[in-house]
Amino acid sequence: MAGIMAENAEVTTALYLLLRIAVLLIFFSIVYKTVIRIIFTYRIRQRYDDIPHLPRHWLAGNLVNVGEQMSPSINAHPDNAMRGIWDELGQPPAYMIDLAPVDRAMLIIADPTMAEAITQPSPEYKYSTPKSNTLQQLTQLVGHHSLVLIEGDEWKVQRRRFNKGFAPMHLNTLIPLVVSKTGVFLDRLKSYAQSGENFQLKDPASDLTTDVITQLAIEKDFQAQTVQEGTGPKSTFGFLTAIKIMSSLTEKTGQGFDISSYIHPERKVKERIYDRLYTKAIYNEIIKKLPSIKQGQSNPDAKPSTVSSAKSIVSLALTGLDPTPSVLDATVSQVKTFLFAGQDTTATLIQWMALELSKSYPSSPLYSEHHRQIREHLCAEHDAVFGSSDPFAALDVLSRENAHVDELLGSKLPYTTAFIKEALRLNPPGGSARLIPLAPYDPDYPHVKAQQPHFLDLPAWTHSKTGERHEARRIRVDGMRLYNSHFIIHRNPNTWGPDATEFDPARFLDRSGKASVDEVEEAINTNKTPTPHANGNANGNANANGSTTKPDAGSAQTGLPHPYHVSTLPTGSYRPFERGPRTCIGSNLAYMEAKIVLAIMARGFEWTKVGLDGTKPEPGEVVYGGTGREDVKVGESQGWRVWSINQVTSVPVDGMRMRVKLKS
Ligand code: HEM
């Protein structure tokens, strides 16, 4: 008995000792991390001072003044607040937000040449500057090996594997599928028209894009457009519910500090359950495909021309590969990525296109003659290409055998393409966040060996309010998050002209207004030297070619339909899909879907916006403003316009509530 007691006492002493050591270790680790953080903050405070910024507090940096504008309680995408700060600073090419000690400093980029510098390959970064670590918040949603997250040679291998599934030649074989799914979308719109009810366009639009991407990726038809909520794949533990929940659980960055997001004990559990369910379902689908992929290998000449025989992206990517666990793991990640990236983005584009169409009807408070003319051009093009007898003829024409659909959807629809591009210019669903670790040592990147400081060229600029001139200079940016804000870049009047916030497809049409706008963009994307901007830019700043002419020449000089035509702008002014090696893999698919959908939306229906942007509030009534703040009153600004919120991507705040009427 005494022996046992002595043994127990020894165990207790040993445990006590271990506990003390553990407490000491934790204590020293906290002290170490705090000291490192203080040094890091001190360095950030010392550096970057020559970059335009709001006044900084010695300890809190910009945490208070910027935090206020980006508060999570303000229901708007951070792009809106960033644009507000950019205006306040006089619209510089880039500016800094210093969030140390809580986070690092951020460089918000508004200038296309600076955006190019971080997204094109460089001697230090073969595939452009690395992605920001904030993207790791997507890991659960898209998987560890997602194209969006990985870097270097691993990225190159994966990108090469999946590129073929998104190549135009392959996508053309899938047009019948997109057309048939758009037919279901059309039926839904018709039934909304019949009932006269108002609805959130986001629902049918994202069901359509879900149906398309799940079929394309894994040849699985979940019939998202027809399945009832709460049943089958939309039941509590259904596949489609899992995608939605995974997406809603993903932390949103750049929205300020929200303590409540950290104290949801059920959140992790939910995340685990749905992740398991979702990942396993995708894995099983891929495993099921393996035998037929093998068969396909023995018959590589089989031409996929119908929906059922069209090869899925996964089949193409796995053809010729040994399905080892690591190959399968990476494939699951890419499927998750495509399902996430291929849904909301394109569905959001469809919603903004509908909003622009609604402004072409006199019943809209935002009606303009300009919008009516745009719709007329669009419909005239659809009449010419698809025939004028039936407003929905596009679906029949595109599903006919030998219809040369690739040509129809390509060079034959320049105005439609320009309309889509303009909708994406004003409402880009994403941006790109990059990060170069601080030299010579970055506490968040202890594995990165000592490296050299990294610099970017900040072009000369003129303060939009004071007129003060600032000369060009080199700024140090390692250690910062570098954010290409497509929202600001695309609305920058110094690039796009004084009417930068106005919707005008003419920016993308060539001289005759007829030839393919894709040719123009191809010239820009292949980095051919762009035509010097006949107009310079509003600040008289140098463009990509160093031209600084003043903006009074107008279209007469260039013969182009818009004085700030895209081909005359600095390289990289238009970048909704980002540019460089990490450009969006799905851009051709998004254009294809958008063209088919627009071909039935424009001629077939009269669109009326309901609620925001649709009903004029009473004078003096308090409404949410363009920044989501509750303080904009009618009359002070068009505070009742639809704005975007952050749901991983940037989406319309009200899900684009609409009413549709069948056009007679
Ligand atoms: C209107 C529709 C879309 C827009 C505006 C859009 C925009 C973007 C942007 C801005 C990026 C760069 C992100 C970054 O730098 O972090 C990107 C990347 C990506 N997108 Fe899209 N996207 C769209 C549709 C799609 C579709 C339909 C798919 C696939 C089904 C897709 C798949 C991807 C993938 C896989 C990447 C990562 C590419 C890489 O790093 O190699 N996207 N997209």
Image (cartoon, helix red, strand yellow):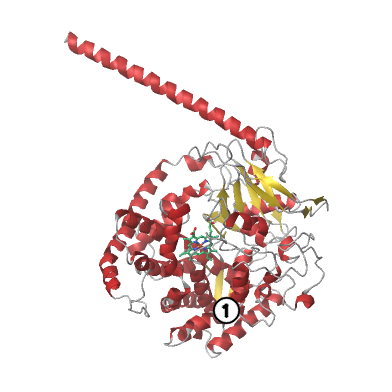
- Categorize mark 1 by other alpha carbons within 10 Å: few (<14), some (14-19), many (20+): many
Name the spot of residue 650 as percent of width and height, x first. 56, 58
Numbered disc 1: secondary structure: helix
- How many marks can you see? 1
Residue 463 shown left or right of residue 222 in the figure? right
The kind of residue tagged 1 is Ala
Q: Which residue is mark 1?
A: 602
Q: Quadrant of residue 549?
A: bottom right
Question: Mark 1: is the Cβ under 8 angstroms from ligand 1?
Answer: no
Residue at the front extreme, as displayed:
123
Residue 269 shown left or right of residue 121 in the figure? left
Do we see residue 647 in this rendering? yes
Do we see residue 81 in this rendering? no
Image quadrant holding the N terminus, namely top left
Instruction: Say above or below: 45 vs 381.
Output: above
Name the spot of residue 400 as percent of width and height, x first. 43, 87
Of residue 355 and residue 588, the one placed in the foreground of this image is 588
Residue at the left extreme, as displayed:
1
Q: Residue at x 34, y 49 (%)?
A: 273
Instruction: Say above or below: 170 vs 27.
Output: below
Instruction: Say above or below: 18 vs 396.
Output: above
Residue 8 shown left or right of residue 41 in the figure? left
Name the spot of residue 36 as percent of width and height, x first. 55, 30
Image quadrant holding the C terminus, namely bottom right
Q: Quadrant of residue 223?
A: bottom left
Of residue 164 and residue 222, the one placed in the foreground of this image is 164
